[in-house]
Image: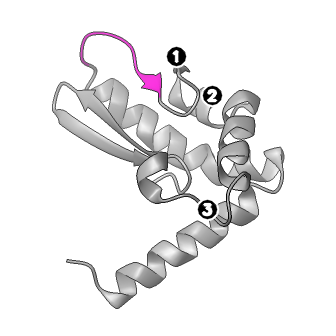
């Protein structure tokens, strides 16, 4: 259920992500633990095939290296700065198919 506190928490996450996107170093620091957690979940539940980043349309050999990397940062920055405000979360959401089912990931907030 969506509550006011959930909305406030999401707004806080969005604000933190927007601030982090102002520099590549800040972005890497912001995403390091979150991308490491994603990597752990993906590889613990590895299915056949590769995990493709839908932002960059490229294979993520390791989620942490990819999501904190220059190419992903630049692509995400351009997606969020070429429109008035931030795009809808759906455009930044990705669903990974794992051996244990679907895993949703928000490329902006890391949630």
Residue occupying image coordinates x 40% and y 34%: 40
Verify CB contact (< 8 Å) between mark 2 and mark 1.
Answer: yes
6 displayed left or right of 69? left
Report the Cα–Cα distance between label 2 and label 1: 8 Å
Find residue 52 and report its image quarter: top left
Residue 50 part of the magenta-drawn span: yes
Q: In this picture, is 8 found above or below 61?
A: below
For label 1, the SS is loop
Q: Quadrant of the C terminus?
A: bottom left
For label 3, the SS is loop
Residue occupying image coordinates x 53% and y 22%: 57
Provide the residue designation for mark 2.
65
Residue occupying image coordinates x 73% and y 54%: 81
Find residue 19 and report its image quarter: bottom right
Residue 48 part of the magenta-drawn span: yes
Outermost top residue = 49
Residue occupying image coordinates x 43% and y 39%: 38
Provide the residue designation for mark 3.
86
Q: Position of residue 15 (x, y in %)?
A: 64, 72
64 displayed left or right of 3? right
30 displayed left or right of 48? right
User: What is the span of residues highlighted in magenta in the rendered image?
Assistant: 47-53
Of tags 1 and 3, the one toward the viewer is 3
Q: Position of residue 10 (x, y in %)?
A: 46, 73
Provide the residue designation for mark 1.
61
Q: Position of residue 96 (x, y in %)?
A: 32, 32
For label 2, the SS is helix
């Amino acid at each position: 259920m969506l509550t006011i506190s959930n909305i406030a928490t999401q707004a806080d996450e969005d604000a933190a992500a927007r601030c982090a996107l102002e520099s590549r170093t800040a972005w890497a620091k912001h995403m390091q633990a979150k991308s490491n957690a994603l990597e752990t979940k993906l590889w613990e539940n590895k299915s056949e095939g590769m995990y493709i980043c839908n932002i960059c349309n490229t294979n993520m050999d390791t989620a942490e290296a990819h999501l904190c990397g220059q190419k992903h940062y630049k692509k995400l920055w351009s997606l969020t700065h070429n429109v008035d405000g931030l795009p809808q979360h759906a455009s930044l959401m990705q669903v990974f198919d794992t051996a244990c089912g679907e895993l949703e990931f928000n490329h902006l907030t890391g949630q």
